[in-house]
Amino acid sequence: MHTSISEVLKEKTLKPSRRSLPCLAQSQTHPHGLHHFLSIPLSPESTKTHTTHSVSTSCTHITPQTTEAPKDQYVEVSEAGGFESRVEESLLIQKPVWRAKLEARTESIKSAKPSGLLFRDGKKRIDYILVYKKSSPQVEKRCTFERNLRAEGLMLEKEPSLTNNDIMFVKIHAPWDTLCKYAEQMNIRMPFRKKCYFSDWKKKAMGRCRQIKSWLPRNPMKLDKEALPDLEETDCYTAPFSRARMHHFTINNRETFFSNSTRSRIVHHVLQRTKYEDGKSKMGINRLLSNSTYEAAFPPHEGGYKSRHPIKTHGAQNHRHLLYERWARWGIWYKYQPLDLIRRYFGEKIGLYFAWLGWYTGMLIPAALVGLFVFLYGLFTMDSSQVSKEICEANTTIMCPMCEENCSSWKLSDSCVYAKVTHLFDNGGTVFFAIFMAIWATVFLEFWKRRRAELTYDWDLIDWEEEEEELRPQFEAKYSRVERVNPISGKPEPFQPFTDKLSRLMVSVSGIFFMISLVLTAVFAVVVFRLIAMEKFASFQWEFVKKNWQFATSGTGVFINFIIIMSLNVVYEKVAYLLTNLEHPRTESEWENSFALKMFLFQFVNLNSSTFYIAFFLGRFAGRPGKYNKLFNRWRLEECHPSGCLIDLCLQMGVIMVFKQMWNNFMELGYPLLQNWWSRRKIRKRGGGGTQLPQWDKDWTLQPMNAHGLVDEYLEMVLQFGFTTIFVAAFPLAPLLALLNNIIEIRLDAYKFVTQWRRPMPARATDIGIWHGILEGIGVLAVITNAFVIAITSDYIPRFVYAFKYGPCVDKGYHHENRCLMGYVNSSLSVFDRGENNSLAPSRYCRYRDYRAPPWSAEPYEFTLQFWHVLAARLAFIIVFEHLVFGIKSFIAYLIPDMPKDLCDRMRREKYLMQEMIYEAELEHLQKERKKNGRRYHHEWP
C-alpha cells in the first residue's frame, strides 16, 4: 500500500525551502505527540467567556470615571524601553557570545509595563482599531455593528483619545476560538510539520560552500544578519487550517500561532462582512467609513520605530523598529531589502511590490551603464562629428526665415550648439542601445517570473489564489438577489447577469474614450501654443532669444505641457474611480486590475501623446518655402532643425521625466510629512504634547495609506518603465535617471510605510496583478517605437544612405564615418529662390531642410531620387529591426523558463511527502485514540 515516510526519505532527499512564515516556537525539536498541544495550558483569555469586556455591551460613551482612569493603564512606554512581555525572541540578537546581555535585556523587557498594544488587562492583544466621533449622528448603526461584532466572537474595548475629546477608539481582539473559526473559513495555510532533509553528501557540499564563502570578501550590500531575526526558520510544511484536524498542526503557543498580520487579516474579514442594519446591502466597514459612522479602521503598529539604544547592542524593540533600522533609514540605501521581514509586517502584497521594485532597480544597473557609455561616446565624439563640423563652419549658408512676418534670414552656423547637443543623443550607438534595451526588457520580465515563482513558494502562496479569492461586499450587496452555483466551490454565490455587465462595460469604455479625447485636445492646444511661440521667439527683439528660438519654443512648450499633464491627472483619478465602481467588479483583485488599467491608459496617453507628436509628426507636414502648410490658414507648422528633431524629443522626455519624479517624490513623502507635522502642532496647541500617547493615538495622527492601495506606487514605476524603454533611442540617459530615482524611491517608500503611514491591512497576493501584462505590452510597443524613432526621427538612415549611395566613399568602400559623410549637410538642404515670392526679402536664394529639386531644374521643388532612397531605407529598416528584435525576444523568452527546474522538483516532492505525512499523522492519531480506549490497533488503516 503506502510507503512509510522513513523509506521515502532514504530514496531521495529534499532541498530545504526558505519559508519565512513563523514556525511558532523557536525550538528546533518536534513535539513528542501530535496531540501534544492539548496538554498546553490555555491562555487566560481562552478560559474566560467572551462576554467579559472592559466596557459595557451597551453602546454608550465612556463615563467620566472611565476617562479619569489612571493613565498608566494605556499609556505607551517610551520608545527607548522594551516591548510587550510576549515579544518574540527572534527580534533579539541571538549570538551565544552576547547571551549575558540577552538575558539581562529579556529580564528588563519582562518587567516593562504593558504598551499601547494590549487591552487594559495587559493580556489581550489589540488586533484592530476603529475610530469614531462622539458627535457622530450614526449612533444606532454603530451600536448594531459593534453588537454584531461581539456576536461573531470578537472582543471590544473602548478608549477615549488623549488629544481630542471628540474621538473614541474601539480596540478589537480576536480570541483563539474566533481565529480558528475564520482561519478555517478563509482557508488560511498554517504550519503543519517541521522537516529538514539533508543527505550526507549534501551536508559535506554545503560545508565546503560555506568554507569557500568565508574566504571571500563580505558583500557590503548584504544586511547584517546579527541584527536581524532568524527569518529563515526551520522548514515548515503548511496546509489549510482545519479545526477537525487541529492535531495535525504544530501548535506550541496559541499566542504566536497566528502572526500579527494573519490576526489583522482575519479581523478585517469579519469587519467586511458584519451587518450594521437589516438587509443584505447594509454590511461592511467600508460603507460605515463612507457614511462617517467611523472615521478610520486600521491595524495598530507594533510600537515606536526609534530607540535611544543602538540596535546592535540592545536589539530591536519590535518589528517596526527593526524595519526602520534595517530598511527605512537613508544611511543604508545600498543594502538589500529585508523582504521576509517586510512580508511579515505588511503582508505578501506589499512585500511583492518591494520585491518587484528592488528587482527592477537592480536590472536597471546594466541598462544605465550602457546608456551612460552611449552618451559619453557622443560627448567625446561631439567635436569630431562631421555633421556638427559642417553646420558650425557654414558661415555662408543662408537659411530661409522661420516666419513670414518680421523674420529675417539666419545663418546655419548660428545653430552650432544645437547641432553638437543633438550629436550627444543621435550618434552611432543609438541603434545598438535600442536593440539592447528591447532585449533588456525581455530579460527583465522573464527573470522576474522566476523570482516571483521563488517568492510565492517561499511565502507559501502557490495555492492561495484559487482557495482564498473572496467576493467584494459591494458586489454581494448589489447582486444578492441573483445567485448561481460557483463551478469551483459548488456553493451558491451572487451573480452579475451578462447584459448588466455588458451595459456597464460599454458606459465605462465610452468614458475612457471621452477622457482620451480630452487628452488629445490638450495636446492640440499645446501644438497651437508652440506654433504661436515659434513665430514670437523667431522675431524676438532680444538677440539671445532670437538666436536660440528653437530651444525657447521647445522649453516653454514642454513646461506648459507638464502643467497640463499634472492638472489632468487629478481629474483622471476621480473619473477612473467612478467608472470602476460603476462596473461593480466581482473581487478586490478585479477591482484593482480594472482601476489600474484605466489609470494607466489615462496617464500613459496624457504623458506620451505630446512625445509621440514630437517624435513622429513634428516637421513632417511643414511644406516648403513658398508653399507652407498652415493651421487654420494662420500659423505655419513647425520645422525640424537641419540636424534633426531628436533634440526636441530628448528635451521633452528629460524635462517630463525629471520634474514628474520630483513631484511624485514630494507628494509621496513631503505631503504626509507636512500633514503629520500639522497634526502634531494641533495636539501641542491643545495641551497634549507633554503626555506620552498610547499607540492607537499615535497611529491616529498618522496619514492613512492611499485609498487605491498600491496602484499609485505601481503606476509611477510602470510609467517610468515606459519612459525608459519606449523612446530610449532618443534619450539614452533615461535608465540612469530611473536608477537614481528608484534608489531614492525604495527608501522613500520604506520610510513612508514605516513612519508616516498607518499600518495598512496585511493583504495577500501571488503576483503584481495586471501590471505584468502592461509591462509586456510596453515591451512590445518599445520595439515598434524605437524602430520608428531611429528610422524617422533621427538622422541615422539619411546619413547611412548618403554614406553608401551619394558620399565620397561610394566607389572606395566604407572606411571612416566622418570621411564618408563629407558634404552630407549640403546634400540634406534644398534651395529656394526667394525672388519668386515678393513677400520675402530681396536676397536671391536660401536653404531649407528637405530633399527637393532646385528651382532651376526641369521639375522645380519636386522630390529628388535621394528622398525616395531614404524613404525606402527607412521602411526597410523598420521591418528588419522589428523582425530581428522580436525574434531575439521570443528566443530569449523560450530559453528562460518561468519557474526554475529545481523549484518545480522541490514542489512536486514536497506535495508527495506532505500526503505521506498526513496519512501517517492521521494513522498515529487513530492508533493513540484506540490505545487509550483499550482497543486493538494495527499498522493499516482501520
Image (cartoon, grey):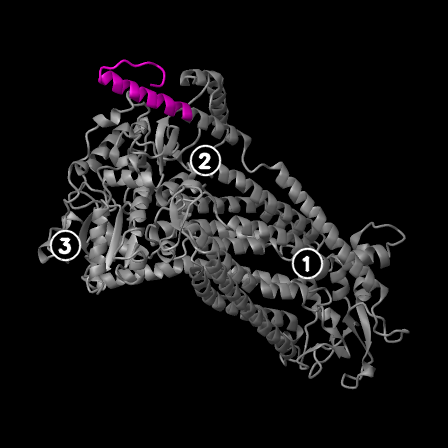
Residue 110 found in image quarter: top left
Taking the image as shown, residue 373 lies to the left or right of residue 841, namely left
Asked whether 15 or 918 is in front, the reply is 918
For residue 789, which numbered disc appears in the image? 1
Secondary structure mainly formed by the magenta segment: helix
* Disc 1 to disc 2, C-alpha distance: 42 Å
Asked whether 760 or 32 is in front, the reply is 32
In the image, what residue occupies the spot 49% across and 28% down? 908
Secondary structure, mark 3, is loop
**Position of residue 108 measured from the top left corner of the image (x, y, whole percent):** 20, 36
**Position of residue 192 measured from the top left corner of the image (x, y, whole percent):** 35, 29
* Disc 2 to disc 3, C-alpha distance: 47 Å
Per the rendered image, the range of residues in magenta is 915-942
Quarter of the image for the N terminus: give it. Answer: top left
Magenta-span inclusion, residue 550 = no
Secondary structure, mark 2, is helix
Are discs 3 and 1 less than 8 Å apart at CB? no
Is 313 situated above or below 620? above
| Residue 133 at least partly seen | no
Are discs 2 and 3 less than 8 Å apart at CB? no
Query: Disc 2 designates what residue?
Result: 457
In the image, what residue occupies the spot 31% across and 23% down? 30
Query: Disc 3 designates what residue?
Result: 58
Looking at numbered disc 1 in the image, what kind of residue is underneath it?
A: Val
Taking the image as shown, residue 810 lies to the left or right of residue 330, namely right
Q: Residues within 10 Å of mark 2 (few under 14, many from 20)?
A: some
Q: Residues within 10 Å of mark 1 (few under 14, many from 20)?
A: many
